[in-house]
Image (spheres, grey):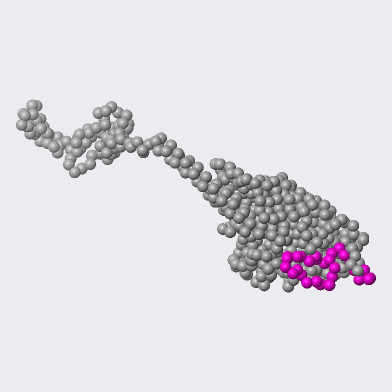
Amino acid sequence: MAGRAKGKAGQPARPSASGGVKRDQGTVKGRGTAKGQGTAKGKTSENSVNNPHGRPSSGRDPRFHSPETLNDVPRKRRKRIKKRPVLARSYVWAPILLVVLVGTYIGFWFYAAKVATLGLTQWVADRRAEGYTVSHGAISVGGFPLGVTLTVPSPSITAPLDLKGWSWSTTSLSARINPFNPGAFFLNARGRHELHLPLGPEGRLLPLAIAGRAMGGYMAVDATGQISESDLSFKDVTLTGLPGGSATISTLTGKTLDGPLYGNDEEKNFDHISWSMELRGSGITMPSGYTLGLGQDLSSLVLDLRVYEAIPGGPLHEGLKSWREEGGYVSIDTLSLAWAPLVAQGSGTLGLDDDLQPAGNFTLGTRGLLDMIEGMSRQGWARPSDANMARMVLSGMAKGSGISTPVTIRRRAISVGPAKLVDLPTIYWGGKGARSLNRVAPGFEIDQDGQVVRDGTINRGPLPDALAPIGRD
């Protein structure tokens, strides 16, 4: 019948209360989903699964639609879009944080500067209490903001008499300190330094002067104000005042540490190491009077050593005596030098005998050793009889151009193999001094009448006994 509406399955449509025709709900299931109409209760529509944020089918963000499209945005997301706290915005809190940080660092810098100044003042007071004479000009503070720089004009220090009264002074000294580590600093010691060291006869002071293009490096001090670590370098340094002439150094670096700089804890007595040093040098020109039978050019020097057992404080003579009684010694782990015509490399140990004079044993591999002994005899550093005996013994030990030989220091003499080569001067540490060995000091002889005379064949100026060559037979 043309006027009657039929359902999808051929069933007649039921009339609604308003007289219209109402289709069966089951006939439109799925069709309404495709047209964006509602879905059955308890089921998720295909559109809600593919578009969970309620965006229109065009895929555009609803914030860029007309206002009525915001109705499709979930309420929680709509609040996040519209409201944001003022303090959550970076352009508000970033300047505040920057001001706080800058102000904190400025306050900390002034605190670190005060601590550094007080630390230096306390160090001077401690040295004065120990008997040193210390003086300096007004301390100036600068270096902001990278660090704290202390500049000390005209500093000087003189040791007490029991330390032989050595002294040091310079025109200016500066140290740059890291505010976050006030116990460490970088020292700038460029300039001229005046020293008086006990290198003369019987420990008399010898005036010296040192100047260089670059002098300084890293240093650290412990709670007592003593240097506990250092890493220093020197470039284009000139040493003047030696009776034998001046010395120049192209490059010299040195590291020290209160403890072991190298090695491992499996070594014997490793935990007894109190101090260690690594020294490297190149381009060194020796004074003409101190070539030791060699040339003036010391092209390279390597020295690594460790000190076992700590040396007590107080008078040096008493401290060294206690150190020796406690079994203290120095381990020369690496000794290497190229001093034409000599090339040597070896190791050994060095300590003190009953008279607190050097005593040790070394093993050296050398080239040019015979030439050095001949030069020492020619320059007066070794007696011809001792030199000839040493050369004769070492010639039988030579293998090609090289000689491997033991070197001993005992009873104030250096011996190469079984042959004595050089007498050593007596070192005065204070106290009563070393006992006599019934011999004369270097640079003197005893004539047939038993009188002490200086050898007239040696004419090198007033060299101190501690550094002078001996007389010839």
Is residue 281 a member of the stretch shown in magenta? no
Measuring from the top left, give residue 356's x and y in whole percent: 73, 69
- Closest to the observer: 248 or 115? 115
Residue 315 appears in the rendering: yes
Residue 395, x across and y down, in percent:
85, 67
Q: Is residue 44 left or right of residue 215?
A: left
Q: Nearer the viewer, residue 70 or 119?
A: 119
Residue 398 as seen in the image, left or right of residue 143:
right
Q: Identify the residue at horizontal 19%, vertical 43% (top origin).
A: 42
Quarter of the image that includes the N terminus: top left
In-image side of 209 versus 271 (left or right): right
Q: Quadrant of residue 379?
A: bottom right
Q: Residue furthest right?
A: 448
Q: For the stretch drawn in magenta, what is the main secondary structure? A: loop
Q: Is residue 276 above or below residue 13?
A: below
Residue at point 35% right, 36% down?
86
Asked whether residue 394 is in view, the answer is: no
Q: Position of residue 189 (x, y in %)?
A: 67, 48
- Please state the extent of the stretch shown in magenta in the rendering: 423-450
468 vs 40: above or below: below
Residue 138: quadrant of the picture: top right
Measuring from the top left, give residue 110's x and y in whole percent. 52, 45
- The residue under the point 76% across, 52% down is 208
